[in-house]
Amino acid sequence: MSDATQVARIASLIGDPARANILSVLMDGRALTAKELAFVARVSPQTTSGHLAKLTEAELLTMERQGRHRYFRLASPLVGQMLESILAVAGPETARATTWRGGETLRTARTCYDHLAGRLGVALADSLTQRDFVALSADGGEVTDSGHAFLRDFGAEPVPGRRVFCRPCLDWSERRPHIAGRLGAALAHRCFELGWVARMRDTRAVAITDAGRQGFQARFGVTLPG
Amino acid sequence: MSDATQVARIASLIGDPARANILSVLMDGRALTAKELAFVARVSPQTTSGHLAKLTEAELLTMERQGRHRYFRLASPLVGQMLESILAVAGPETARATTWRGGETLRTARTCYDHLAGRLGVALADSLTQRDFVALSADGGEVTDSGHAFLRDFGAEPVPGRRVFCRPCLDWSERRPHIAGRLGAALAHRCFELGWVARMRDTRAVAITDAGRQGFQARFGVTLPG
DNA sequence: CGGATGCTTCGGCCGCCGCCGTAGGTTCAG
DNA sequence: CTGAACCTACGGCGGCGGCCGAAGCATCCG
């Protein structure tokens, strides 16, 4: 089976509006039940069940039983990365379209699978790059010695693992890279831990708290609009 | 309209096997005619025309008229990046092979339809241009008198035919033009004939031989890394 | 145990879309 | 001007696949 056939197989799965809704809402890395996903997909639970079976079969999602609930989440960061790259292509259209509820909030700060994106994510990447803590290239990134010290001090030392350490991820709304990979995940985790940002319901947008505004200014030199 | 709807719109376009074939074969940055694309898509020209219209409408492809031909290419590197990320999900083993094993080799030298591309292809174009053997413009190219003499001496006189004689082809990895058309084909053919380059299995990458390294240096003034 | 909840399977309906044949517009060669 | 090559527009056919109602398992609760 050729590469193109595989691409078509995956893309046709994402190409259905109901399934695209499901995948999009799972992009923040959370795990949701079939019923919740039926709601966001705006189709009946029966139909949703079929969609989820297909997505799981294709290894775009993973499922874990928990009592009588079934929780679904993206199978890997690769899937989130793929969705993000499709958004990057579809993005200009979205930007041209009328602003919808939450649009501006999403552009300010949101989660991208397990790291921070939007203006906040890009600003953090800029800050780290400008201070020579991180060197970003087209297809990878490295943390400098002083960068490691800064991260240790900040409390965001990435956990060891096989996953790529630091990777630039093109931001669909800002059209500039933010930091993904284990480093991106660690940064985001620490920001949530410090209460600098907080998840919002039913959206990937995150709220920046007052403490966050002060913290991002003090530690990263990033000034965010109040 | 939500971002998920946009994702579905783009993905459903890619989700058709014929269109996936078209996009995949264009991933190397070449521009192909509708007829050629009909062949790779394995559907009739009429059907292909419809597909190409949709892909162009969605700004995944761009089209330029050239006489009675219509050349199609990917609208931007973002589109190629998106396709790669889908491929990364579709076949981790396949993607790793293309990205890692062949990545650097592909960038160094590869075939683009029937001519040479990558750093080698761009370097040859630069050499011919700099010596006033070839004059490249945005939508075509001409060979000078001294250029014809050089080519005759080199043994790469293009065969007569209706096909475009000399055409700049934007190089996917280098983002600079290399030489396509009958001239590009003749050059590539002669390089293979001289044993300067050799095809590799299951990839568009080509290997540059030791004889090639010396030859490219002597005849074209092109120095290639060992 | 019986009812409620979460989820899946099955079956049938229906609309969308990919496909090609025919026909027509445009460009180029002789 | 004639014929050929390239591409597109239109119409009708056929099948894939999304959708829901009804029914069937699994799990939890009282």
Image (tube, coloured by chain):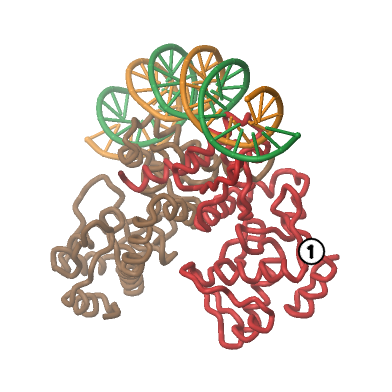
Chain colours: A red, B brown, C orange, D green
For the C terminus of chain A, the quadrant is bottom right
When the figure is inspected, residue D13 is found, relative to residue A98, above or below; the finding is above
> Label 1: few (<14), some or many (≥20) within 10 Å?
many
Count of marks, rendered view? 1
Image spot of residue B69 (x, y percent): 38, 41
Image spot of residue D23 (x, y percent): 55, 17
Q: Which residue is mark 1?
A: A208
When the figure is inspected, residue B42 is found, relative to residue A182, above or below; the finding is above
Residue type pointed to by label 1: Ile
Image spot of residue A23 (x, y percent): 58, 45
Residue drawn at x 49%, y 53% is B82
In screen coordinates, is B133 left or right of B50?
left
Q: Nearer the viewer, residue B221 or C17?
A: C17
Q: Nearer the viewer, residue A207 or B209?
A: A207
Image spot of residue B13 (x, y percent): 49, 39
Chain ID at mark 1 = A
Residue drawn at x 36%, y 32% is B45
In screen coordinates, is A141 left or right of B224?
right
Give the quarter of the image for residue A40: top right
**Do we see residue A119 in this rendering?**
yes
Element assignment for label 1: strand
In screen coordinates, is A10 left or right of B133?
right
Residue drawn at x 45%, y 42% is A57
When the figure is inspected, residue B67 is found, relative to residue B50, above or below; the finding is below
Q: Nearer the viewer, residue B7 or C25?
A: B7
Give the quarter of the image for residue B178: bottom left
